Image: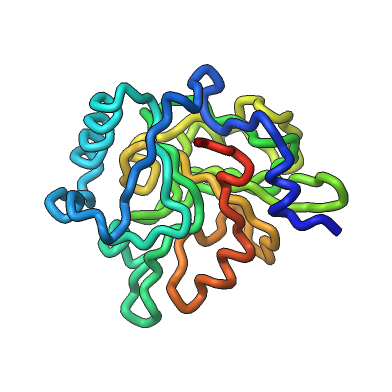
Amino acid sequence: METLENLLKEIQNVKVIDDSISYTEYIPLDLSVSNIELSKLAIDDATIFEEFIEEKLLKNKAKVAFGGYNEERNLYKRSTVFNDNQTEERNIHIGLDLWIKAGTPVLAALDGTVHSFNYNNNLGDYGPTILLKHSIKDQSFYTLYGHLSLESIANIEVGSFFTKGQQLATLGDASVNGNYAPHLHFQIIKDIATNIGDYPGVCSKKDLNYYLENCPNPNLLLKIK
């Protein structure tokens, strides 16, 4: 059977935020531990972090900043969600982040049904979250959309069907999205196990190989240059 990775590569014309924005208006954003610029920035302050991103976009005449798959970050040290001192720190991001202002439309990547949703309201968590289930060529997999607005999950129902490119949600602001600058966390998941309305988006080094296998690079599907 064809691998999911190869299947994702074959699919064309996929967007998960505002379809009116061309991929030519996207710029990469490095939030890794090796980015010295971040060491001088209070990235745990959502307002300061949002101003940092807006400055990057303005400077580059862009509308969206993206990146973060398999990226080791210091961003999560502020939260016990990722660092409880009992287990190895989770600090490697395994989704793709798309940074743009709150209220931006979020689109279903592919035809799919609502698997589950939840308000994950811990500091540093996803905030409002929706997961879709997809079935293509005898393969079933899931996409996760995190850091949404509360309105996005107010009237949604498990089992509801969304077509590729249909508006699924809108992005939330720092007051509801886990206290981050507004952005979409987009992740692809092969085996969701028993998770409902949630799935790890950050992992430890010891678990990295498993999560990279179970969560392929979302850019295989999006194809952002």
Residue 182 location (% of width, % of height):
36, 36
47 or 56, nearer to the observer: 56
Q: Which residue is drawn at 87% across and 51% down?
A: 138
Q: Residue at x 38, y 31 (%)?
A: 100
184 relative to 37 in the view: left or right: right
- Residue 169 in sight here: no
Question: Outermost residue, top direction?
Answer: 20
Question: Outermost residue, left direction?
Answer: 40
When asked about the image quadrant of residue 101, the answer is top left
Residue 23 location (% of width, % of height):
49, 27
19 or 10, nearer to the observer: 10
Q: Which residue is drawn at 57% across and 47% down?
A: 218
Where the N terminus falls, by quadrant? Answer: bottom right
Q: Residue at x 23, y 41 (%)?
A: 49
- Position of residue 67 relative to residue 156, above or below, is below
- Count of marks, rendered view: 0
